[in-house]
Image (cartoon, rainbow, N blue to C red):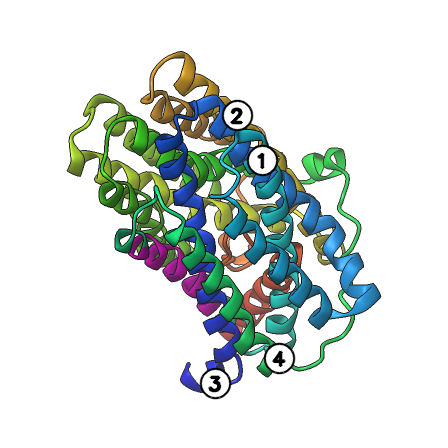
Amino acid sequence: MIKTLSGVWALLLGIVLIMLGNGMHFTLIGLRGGIEGFSSGALAVVTTGYFVGFLSGARLSPLMIQRVGHVRVFAALGSFMSAGLIALPLLTEPWAWTVLRIIVGFCMSGIYVAAESWLNAAATNETRGKVLSAYMIAQTLGIIGAQALLTLGDAATSALFIGASILVSISFAPILLSATAVPAVKVAKPMPLRKLFRGSPLGTVGIFLLGSVYATQSGMGAVFGSQIGLTANQIALFVAMLFAGALVLQYPIGWLSDRMDRRVLILGLASLGAASCLLGWVTGEALWSLMMAAFLAGGVTTPLYALLLAYANDALSADDMPAASGGLVFTFGLGAIAGPLIAGWAMQGVNPFAFWLVLGSTFCMIALYALYRMTQRGVSPVSETDSYLSILPTASPIAVEAAGEWAVENAEAESEKSSA
C-alpha cells in the first residue's frame, strides 16, 4: 500500500488540506448564520447555492480544462474559492452568501475534476482500487479534522473564515508542484435520465433521494445544531460524527455488498438510517443520543451512495458506463439541490427537529422503493455483479467512471481466480 501511494501522496495531502478548508466553511455557515439571525429557510437557500454551483461546475469545468489545461483551471478556481471564503464574513447577507456559495461550489467541483484526473492518470489498473480508497479516506479525514479546527476560534469573527481560506490556498502547492501532465479530460455526455431510469430504476431514484439526504446532513446539520442551542464545540462534534460514521462503516458494508443481494442491503441500510433519525427525533436535545443518531445516519449515507452506484453498474453494459456516470452524478446533484430547501422550510415551519423528520422520511422512501423493486426484478447472482465502488458522494464523473471501470475489472479478475 505504501508503494502504491508513494506516487500520489502529494495529491492526497493537497486534498486533505482542501477538505479542511471546505469542511470548515460548511459548518461555519450554520454557526455564523445563527449568530446573524438568519432563518432556516434563508440558510437552506444558501446551502442549495453550493450544490447549484457544484452541479454547474461538474458540467463546465471539463470544457474549461480542455481549452486552457489543468494547471490554469486548477489555479484559477483555487484563487476564486479562497477569495469567496474570505468574503463570506464581510458580506453577511443571505443573498450575498448564496452568490458566494454558488461560486465556491463551482470552484470546488472543478477542483475535484482536475485533481481526480491527475489521480486517475497516476494510478494503474492494479492500483486504482487502492488509490480511490485512499482518496476517499483523505477526503473524509479532512472533513472530520476541519471540525476540530473550528474549536480554535470564534465564528463571530473573521478568523475561522480566513483560516479556511489559507488552508485552501496552501493546498494547491503540493498538487501543482507534483502533478504531471495528463491527457485532456474527456467526459461523456450524461445519459438521459429516462434511459438511466430504464436501465436501473432503483439506482436512479435511490441516488436522487440520497443526494437530498447528503446535502441536508452536510449543509443543514450545523444549522440544526445552532437552532437547538448546541455550543460551537458540540456542533462541530455533531458534524464530525456524521462523517466519522461513514469512515467506520464503509468497509464492512462494502464487504457485505459483494456477498449478498444488493437490494436487500440497500433496504437494510436505508431502514437503519430511518431508525437513527427516529432516535434523533424522540431523544430531543440529549447530547450523546444526538451524536449516536448522527453517527448512524451519516454512517449509512456514504456507503449507500457507493452501493447504489455499484447496483446501477450491475444493470448497465460497459459501453454505457461513461455516460451513466455523468447521468448519476447529475441525478445526485438534483437531489442535493432539493433536499436542503425542503429541510430548511420544514425546520422553519415546524421546529428545528424537522431536520430528522425530513431525513427519516427520505430514508424511508429509499427503503420502500428498494422493497418494491425486489418484487419487479429477479435476483442477480453474486458471481455476476461488479465489485463494490469505494467512492464518495462528492466525486466528479471522472472518479465515478474510473471506479466503475475498476469494479468491472476487479470482478472479472476475481471470477477468473475462483474458476481457475
Per the image, the residue denoted by label 1 is 96
Per the image, the residue denoted by label 3 is 6
Q: In the figure, 220 relative to 170: above or below? A: above
Q: Do the residues labelled 2 and 1 touch (CB within 8 Å)?
A: no
Task: Examine the structure image and report whether residue 134 is included in the region drawn in magenta.
Answer: yes
Tell me which amino acid carries mark 1.
Ala
Q: What stretch is highlighted in magenta?
A: 133-149
Is residue 8 visible in the rendered image? The answer is yes
Q: What separation in Å lies between label 1 and label 3 (alpha carbons)?
A: 42 Å
Farthest residue toward the top?
349
Mark 3 packing: few (<14 Cα in 10 Å), some, or many (20+)? Answer: few
Q: Do the residues labelled 2 and 4 touch (CB within 8 Å)?
A: no
Q: Residue at x 49, y 58 (%)?
A: 165
Tell me the chief SS of the magenta region: helix
Q: Which residue is drawn at 70% across and 54% down?
A: 321
Question: Where residue 340 appears, x then y in whole percent?
Answer: 50, 30
Would you identify the image quadrant in which residue 221 lies? top left
- Horizontal side of residue 261 vs 315, given as left or right: left
Question: Where residue 191 appears, x then y in whole percent?
Answer: 76, 44
Tell me which amino acid carries mark 2.
Leu
Front: mark 1 or 3: 1
Per the image, the residue denoted by label 4 is 179
Per the image, the residue denoted by label 2 is 341
Nearer to me, 33 or 127: 33
Mark found first going from the N terminus, 2 or 4: 4
Secondary element at tag 4: loop
Q: In the figure, 99 relative to 189: above or below? A: above
Would you identify the image quadrant in which residue 358 lies? top left
Tell me which amino acid carries mark 3.
Ser
